[in-house]
Image (cartoon, rainbow, N blue to C red):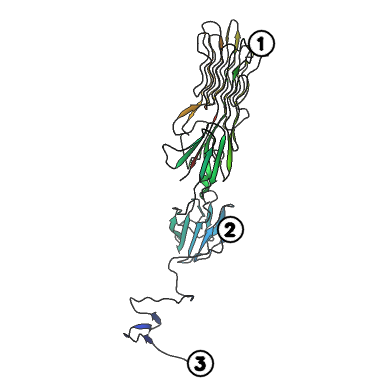
Amino acid sequence: MTSVIKVDNIQKVSDGSNIIKKCGSTITLGSCGQTVAIASGATTSGMGRTGTVDWQTGSIKTSTFTAVSGEGYFCNTSGGAFTVNLPAGSAGAIVSVVDYTNTFQTNALTISPNGSEKIGGVAADTTLSTVGQSVTFVYVDGTEGWKNVQDSTSNATGISVLSASVSGSGNTLTTAPCNANIKIATFTGPGNFVVCSVSSIASENTVGYMVLGGGGGNGNDSPPGSYSGGGGAGGYREGRNAPIDNFTASPLVANAPTNALTVSAQSYPITVGAGGTGRTQGSTSIFGSIQGAGGGFGAMDGGGASPASAGTGGSGGGGNFANTSAGAGNTPPTTPSQGNPGGTGVNSPPAYGSGGGGGAGAAGQNGTTSKGGNGGAGVSSSITGSSVARAGGGGGFAVNSGIQGGTGGTGGGGPGYGPAGPTGTPGTANTGGGSGGPNPGAKTNGGSGIVVIRYKFQ
């Protein structure tokens, strides 16, 4: 036989207060001011919700699924965007979602109501596209449907950051003067950019860069003459991760998706192109997949050697009286263009003006019977913390008493020789400037290139 105990109240012996009390159809546990504890390991049912969800830690979501009221989900969109279908709404239903891998900004999570039900009074899907976002929806009624009662975009995490070092003589790693969260790696010679660790925030693993090739050279290896066009500037490549580090870039800064270079934990060899020597093209500068070609050399009459037409390159060399045509720029082609063509030379005895070398910002000017062509202008960028002009073309050589050589393009281009001045000079080091058409019998070198990398480190 089954035993039955029938009571209305159970009270404490010490003071007679109720532990369990029946009042009509309601059973009260404990008395006012007391705490009711559930034994360790025990479970409850029918107690009702308190506005929270049970987080499904054992089932990380990576593809479209239908949510269940009372549950919270960790959604991993690193492999692609997908959809969370909300359940049929009933008053008090609750669903939460959170960005599991901090990738909602790359691959958004879509939240879709059931049938014609609404989210915030609108019968349409909504998308979550903020990194680290977490949202809680509660169903209210048919008028408003699901309401967003909690939206966190603070993304409070234990954050790892991008950490790097540099190697190579003369290369530096400094903090940006106007942004204490940014590091600047400057390579004036060969070395390595070593990424020691990457950030837990994917967007912070893209780095800004400037990669500038060496300027084109000029002149003969044997006297007596040269009569050279100006050397072309080295190819100019620039990108920035604007949402993270929006420094003032040049007009040649690349647009997405090539606006910044994504790095991983490894060592990146850096090549800094040397300026061309004599009748040689400058050398290419390299960082990862980004290359700035060397500038083309200026055309020359030979001076005892075979005449040489203007060279192509990042920017092209200028023509001269024996080879009046100019060298092409943006060779090999890039988008945006890495440089411009040189100017043409003029052959009108007894006066001859060689063309200026092309610059990153403008083509070299044509030579005339009264002046050598000016080198094409370079461009300015604040990637190193202050505005600096680089990649100017070299000025063209001039022949005939009383006329001047071409001026060098702003950004390190060397001026060209003329009987009335100036002296033909090399391009400036680490600007990628083209060399000026040199004095008779001489030769001038292009300016060496440079590589600069910017990244967020804290």
- Front tag of 1 and 2: 1
Task: Name which residue type carries label 3.
Answer: Thr
- Front tag of 3 and 2: 3
Say which residue label 3 marks. 2
Cα separation between marks 3 and 2: 52 Å
Return the x and y of residue 336 as percentages of the image width and height. 56, 32
Comparing 80 with 406, the one in front is 406
Say which residue label 2 marks. 64
**SS label for mark 1:** loop
Q: Is residue 345 above or below residue 120?
A: above
Return the x and y of residue 351 as percentages of the image width and height. 57, 7
Q: Do callouts 3 and 2 mark residues in contact (Cβ within 8 Å)?
A: no
Give the residue at the far right of this rendering: 306
Q: How many residues crowd mark 3 within 10 Å: few (<14), some (14–19), many (20+)? A: few
Which of the marked residues, 1 or 3, is nearer the chain's N terminus? 3
- Front tag of 1 and 3: 1
Total labels: the figure holds 3
Residue at coordinates 66% horizontally, 11% vertically from top-left?
304
Cα separation between marks 1 and 2: 76 Å
Q: Do callouts 1 and 2 mark residues in contact (Cβ within 8 Å)?
A: no
Which of the marked residues, 3 or 2, is nearer the chain's N terminus? 3
Task: Name which residue type carries label 1.
Answer: Gly
**SS label for mark 3:** loop
